[in-house]
Image: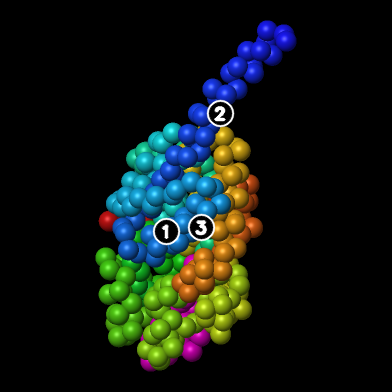
Amino acid sequence: MPTLARRALLAAPLALPALTQAQARSITWIVPFAAGGITDTAARITGQRMAQSLGQQIVVENRPGAGGTIGAEAVARSAPDGLTLLYGSQGPIAAAPALYPNLRYQPLRDLAPVHGLGASPHLIVSAPGKPWPDLAGLVAAAKAAPETLTYASSGVGTSPHLAGEALQQATGAKLTHIPYANGTQALNDVIAGRVDVIWDYPLTALPHVREGRLRALAVTDHGRVPLAGEVPTVAEAGLPGAELVPWAALFTAPRTPPETVARLAAALREAMQDPKVQEFFEGTGTVLWPQMGTAELAGFLQEELPRIAGLIARAGAKPG
């Protein structure tokens, strides 16, 4: 037997245990928000199903703070081995770079896109006692009396704030933004009529719509949301261009080998086919993205980040 072949044969058994050990190591999935919320629950349900496909344990770790940027930075600085994942969303990935000039990571450079997870479109809602019956009526009222109508949000730079800016940019209407530190209080003030309108998630707004305390004017996606199929899209309401949806996607460390990224993407895609996973997301009003693969997600981010940055610049938004 030639010397090189003998050396390869002798080395092969030594390499196998190392490979098995790496595959057996658990994966840490960082959720950059507090435990117990929808994002945390979504990661745990999805991660459990992904672990079955990967044959590896997935441990969800909550690292909240600074609008999700603490957790995102931790993944950006992690080893490029696919063992640290990020539940990335619109805030820390798209809004943060435009809000925080000293942000210590750049998403397009410092995070590797793996696969899209889904989008949670907003419902545009107002109290039923308001004088507009639909979204076109709201816009007409705002144009007739610029900056007198108000819209609430859960804070500067949040998705509800930016969705309001998207409507104004698409229509030329001018509303006054009222940021709240607490999203529940913001919604309650809209129900009470103290604020005119809010962009809110179906999970929290829809019960009030069903019980007559709110009127749903439109949904901010290109298609209707199954959970609220009777609510028209902004385009169907006559205002195309006012779409904006909060979204989530899976990321890992930069320079992670492409084959590792592909393996993670395949596991997430398989998880999204699981009926239990689908049932959970449908119950939250989330539209899953099984076709948003690695390349598609990278392309989406190239368009999404400049768009969000433009909305933030237009609003003159500054972090609180």
* Residue 97 spot, x, y in % from top left: 42, 46
Q: Is residue 24 magenta-colored? A: no
The answer for how far apart the CA atoms under marks 3 and 2 are is 27 Å
Task: For the C terminus, give its image quadrant.
Answer: bottom left
Mark 3 crowdedness (10 Å alpha carbons): few <14, some 14-19, many ≥20 = many
The label number, if any, that marks residue 44 in the structure image: 1
Residue in the picture at 34% in, 81% down: 190
Against 14, residue 191 (above or below) is below
Residue 182 spot, x, y in % from top left: 28, 68
Mark number, residue 49: 3
Amino acid type, residue under disc 3 in the picture: Arg
Instruction: Give the mark, 3 or 2, whose residue is nearer the N terminus.
Output: 2
Mark 3 against mark 2, which lies toward the viewer? Answer: 2
SS assignment at label 1: helix
Residue annotated with mark 2: 16
Do residues under tags 1 and 3 come within 8 Å of each other at their CB atoms? no
Q: Residue at x 60, y 37 (%)?
A: 258
For badge 1, the amino acid type reads: Arg
Magenta segment boundaries in residue numbering: 120-139
In the rendered image, the quadrant that contains the N terminus is top right
* Label located before the other in sequence (1 or 3): 1
Distance from the alpha carbon under mark 1 to that under mark 3: 9 Å
Q: Decide if residue 105 is on the left or right side of residue 189.
A: right
Q: Is residue 201 left or right of residue 2?
A: left
- Secondary structure beneath disc 2? helix
